[in-house]
Amino acid sequence: MSDSLPIRDDLRGRTPYGAPQLDVAVRLNTNENSYPLPDDVVEAIGKAVQAELRDLNRYPDRDAMALRTALADYLGHGLTAAQVWAANGSNEVQQQLLQAFGGPGRTALGFGPSYSMHPLLAAGTGTRWIGALRDPDFGLTPAAAVAQLEEHDPDVVFLCSPNNPTGTALDPSVTGAVLAAARGMVIVDEAYAEFARPGTPSAVELLPASSRLVVTRTMSKAFGFAGGRLGYLAADPAVVDAVQLVRLPYHLSALTQAAARAALAQRDALLATVAAIKEQRDRIVGTLRERGYRVADSDANFVLFAVSPGEASGDQRVVWQRLLDRGVLVRDVGLAGWLRVTAGTPAETDAFLEALR
Ligand SMILES: *Cc1c(COP(=O)(O)O)cnc(C)c1O
């Protein structure tokens, strides 16, 4: 970037989010759903979008009421549209939350290693980022979380459950303890909730207990709708009122709203791949452990693994390149000695396991 541009001082020299989008046979680096949409869902979305086209001279429903009603219905727990908000991906939802509750003079805290977009969204909104830490084994205990909150007293706390890139869901006691200890907003990023192992509760259950809790979800992963760009939140209606102060008018296009509504109406067909993906995830975890690799428990559609079997530590950049040379793209999240691989189709798992060998 040209040094001559009068860019904000706090953005100068930063690098943008950039998972490589390479044309490789086996792409297991961004946790997309590997399965294309089934034909009848494609047809239903096509019809829904077609029905909007003549009215594209008009702005869309600014409040996306029909879509929010459908999302509330999907989430269950008695939620209503007043407690749900939607935007172009949960990244945009989180950006709006930071615009409303963070910003210049305020702070946001997250427990790394976690989702790399949280600090980037903080930077973009002028929110000072505080990098708190998970335990060395990637877990997070209530005591460790609370101690770091008491030290920093942030305006916004990010939790991620199941956590990206480590894969493990948070114990609900952590979310409860963080809510009790935090003065500010607590955002629980549940992008991978649909993949969680049985018995893993969602923070949605805690919503009645606190108006400072926000749960964000997305259709990008389990729904296989990453290209459709639809994320959403569930929270107290006052939180929805707050994000409406900062959202752009008509931020969610009529085409996006129609496509997402049609996709939600076909949710059984779309979510049918989740069980198959979880099977591949568990197969990757099991096979790597049999081969002597250290692997984090995963409640998501990806697996974090140490690149050298046993206790030896390897250079993940070398292994990443060697896998790529064999046509398999995985993710280097910048964690020394570890790589993250998305669970996709059985054939993709075969290719990954063979290439790693
Ligand atoms: C993939 C992912 C998202 C999804 O972002 P969208 O903008 O909804 O596509 C959100 N949070 C985490 C932790 C993710 O890994």
Image (tube, rainbow, N blue to C red):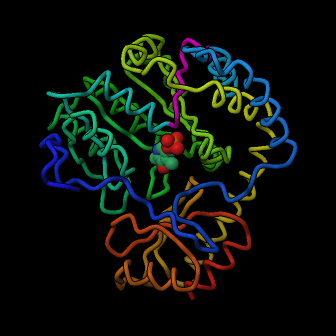
Measured along the vertical axis of the image, is residue 233 above or below residue 144?
above
* On-image quarter of the N terminus: bottom left
Asked whether residue 214 appears in the rendered view, the answer is yes
Q: Residue at x 45, y 64 (%)?
A: 20
* Relative side of 353 to 110, left or right: right
- Residue 134's place in the image compared with 318, above or below, is above
The magenta segment is 78-89
Residue at 79% x, 36% y is 46
Residue 173 magenta: no
Q: Which residue is at 34% across, 56% downward?
A: 113
Q: Quadrant of residue 73?
A: top right
Q: Which residue sits at x=29%, y=30%?
A: 156
Task: Tell me where residue 331 appears, x and y as whole percent.
Answer: 46, 67
Image quadrant for the C terminus?
bottom right
Residue nearest the viewer, comparing 237 with 247: 247
Q: Is residue 81 magenta?
A: yes
> Quadrant location of residue 11?
top left
Q: Position of residue 268 (x, y in %)?
A: 80, 39
Q: Is residue 181 left or right of residue 261?
A: left
Residue 246 or residue 6, whichever sits in front: 6
- The vertical placement of 350 against 278, above or below, is below
Looking at the image, can residue 161 be seen?
Answer: no
Q: Horizontal and vertical percent for residue 317?
A: 37, 78
Pick whichever, 352 or 328, lies toward us: 328
Considering every residue shown, the one lying at the far bottom of the view is: 357
